[in-house]
Amino acid sequence: MILDHQEKPLASWTGKERISGETVDCLTIIFKSGGCSWNRCLMCGYKFERYDKTSPELLRDSIIRQLNWIFSNYKTDKFRLIKIFTSGSFLDPIEVPKEAMKEIVSRFSDKILIVETRPEYVNDIVLDEICGIMKPDDVGKNFYIAMGLETTNDAIREKCIDKGNTFDDFKEAVSEAKKYGAGVKTYLMMKPLFLTEKEAIDDMKKSIKESAPYSDFISMNVCTVQSRTEVEYFWKRGAYRPAYLWSVLDVLVSSDIHVACDPVGGGKKRGPHNCGICDHDLVEAINNYSLNADRGYLKAHLEKDCKCKSEWEFILDNEMPYCMPLTN
Ligand code: SF4
Ligand SMILES: [Zn+2]
């Protein structure tokens, strides 16, 4: 195996993250991998990130070279939390060959590690392997499995996202993770295709309540328009608008538990946005809330006024749902 060579990962950045009530320094890495085996979600632009499919050995070496690059370019000692993403599932052995997965876990075994995967790859085999690398106590304390549940509504997940799994699949993966003491981070997705603004808000409020018992923490993504996706197809035809930032605030403020949210693309046409005047302030408030969990602070922003607020309220009352045929 080539250990000295380096290759730049797809992306990596540093920041802060709230975990177990504490704000810690965090390094996020997106590895170039074999690509998502499911590859169908309607909003997902990662579908086009696929590398080194020629052989598992080449893919393994490429991922390890990317790991080497991280260790050469960051002082990893500085970070308590490492978040690992691929363009799909870190625990899918086709996408991330086993040896590469083990090498990554082993080199970060003294950190809090969050890895993202689809639920079907959370099983005894892979968790036994991870337990063999991290100290048994550490898996309970320091290892988190992040899964994109997106919504607890199976019909929305199927029709509006095409995620290919159910709330029950997620729950099964959660009990598997819990058997090993691992933590669970749940990702929800606000306003996928075909929902009105009001339906999107209601879906998130319900999903937060229903997924909370299965989650150590929840992070809500807000759907953005990524290029070459079905969402972009509809957006270009005026049939999709990303969520209003007011809606994001409304969901976060009304939740009983703290839900983190990084409104990627906030204030831009392709991301969650308002009128262009109040956007910057609200995006900053949402990002701050993700770290400080101060609901009063966020509520004060939701109570602010702007010329777009009455437009948003009008939309909530008047936007009509799409009429989709139930059969082909
Ligand atoms: S499972 Fe994840 S990576 Fe795969 S298509 Fe869906 S959103 Fe994209
Ligand atoms: Zn405004």
Image (cartoon, rainbow, N blue to C red):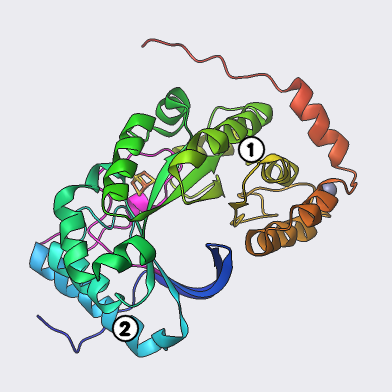
- Quick one: SS at disc 1? loop
Q: Quadrant of the C terminus?
A: top left
How far across and down, in percent of the image, does residue 226 sit?
49, 49
Number of the label disc, if any, that sits on residue 241:
1
Let me know if residue 182 is in the magenta part. Answer: no
Query: Which numbered mark, 1 or 2, is in the foreground of this view?
Result: 2
Classify 84 as above or below 261.
Answer: below
- Give, as a three-letter code, the residue at label 2: Trp
Q: Helix, strand or loop at disc 2?
A: helix
Q: Quadrant of residue 256?
A: top right
Q: In the rendered structure, find residue 69 and report the number of the disc placed on it.
A: 2
For the record, the magenta segment spans 29-55
In this view, 103 is above or below 176: below
Question: In the displayed structure, would residue 328 be above or below residue 254?
Answer: above
1 and 2 marks in contact (CB < 8 Å):
no
Q: Main secondary structure of the magenta part?
A: loop
Query: Which quadrant, please, contains the N terminus?
Result: bottom left
First of labels 1, 2 by sequence position: 2
Does the magenta portion include 41? yes
Residue type at mark 1? Arg
Side of 324 where 328 appears, left or right: left
x, y (%) of residue 310? 87, 35
| Quadrant in the rendering for residue 100 | bottom left
